[in-house]
Amino acid sequence: MSQQEDLTTITRRLDELVQRVGELERTVDQLRGAGDQLRGTRPAAQQGPKPAARHELVTIPDAPYNNALWTDSDDEGLGVRDRHAP
């Protein structure tokens, strides 16, 4: 095929795709409308914002952490304690 024939084929296929997507959108809108009438509800986009989720506050004690938690840990960015940095 020549480039012109390829371009024509691509253009035709794109037009068909746009037409089918339009048909699909109309079908979905019709189904959504029929379902809303049966349920008596509005689509989610028209219901308004959802309420914010409630998060419980976590209290952090002021007491210092147990030093045993930090044994065998490396100082971040400094390397292992008994070795020299490169």
Image (cartoon, rainbow, N blue to C red):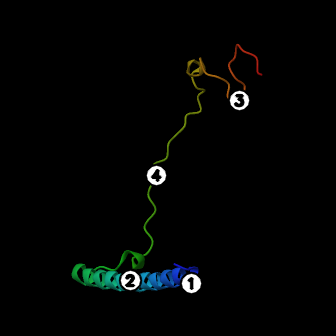
Is 61 left, or right, of 31 in this rendering? right
Q: Secondary structure at mark 2?
A: helix
**Residue 35: image location, x then y, percent:** 25, 80
Mark 4–mark 1 distance (CA, rounded to whole Å): 61 Å
Q: Local crowd at mark 1 within 10 Å, few (<14), some, or many (≥20)?
A: few
Q: Local crowd at mark 2 within 10 Å, few (<14), some, or many (≥20)?
A: few
Q: Secondary structure at mark 3?
A: loop
Q: Secondary structure at mark 4?
A: loop
Q: Disc 1 marks which residue?
A: 4
The relative height of residue 54 versus residue 25 in the rendered view (above or below) is above
Q: Local crowd at mark 3 within 10 Å, few (<14), some, or many (≥20)?
A: few
Which residue is painted at 51% across and 84% down in the image? 11
**Residue 5: image location, x then y, percent:** 52, 83
Which residue is painted at 61% across and 21% down in the image? 73
Q: Disc 4 marks which residue?
A: 55
Counting residues from the N terminus, which is met first, the one under dot 3 or under dot 1?
A: 1
Mark 2–mark 3 distance (CA, rounded to whole Å): 57 Å
Is the C-beta separation of discs 4 and 2 under 8 Å? no
Mark 3–mark 1 distance (CA, rounded to whole Å): 61 Å
Which residue is painted at 76% across and 17% down in the image? 84
**Towards the viewer: 49 or 72:** 72
Q: Which is closer to the viewer, label 3 or label 4?
A: 3
For the C terminus, give its image quadrant. top right
What label does residue 69 carry, if any? none
The three-letter amino acid code for the residue at tag 2 is Arg
Mark 3–mark 4 distance (CA, rounded to whole Å): 34 Å
Q: Local crowd at mark 4 within 10 Å, few (<14), some, or many (≥20)?
A: few
Query: Which quarter of the picture shows residue 20?
Result: bottom left
The three-letter amino acid code for the residue at tag 4 is His
Q: Secondary structure at mark 1?
A: helix
Mark 4–mark 2 distance (CA, rounded to whole Å): 45 Å
Q: Disc 3 marks which residue?
A: 77
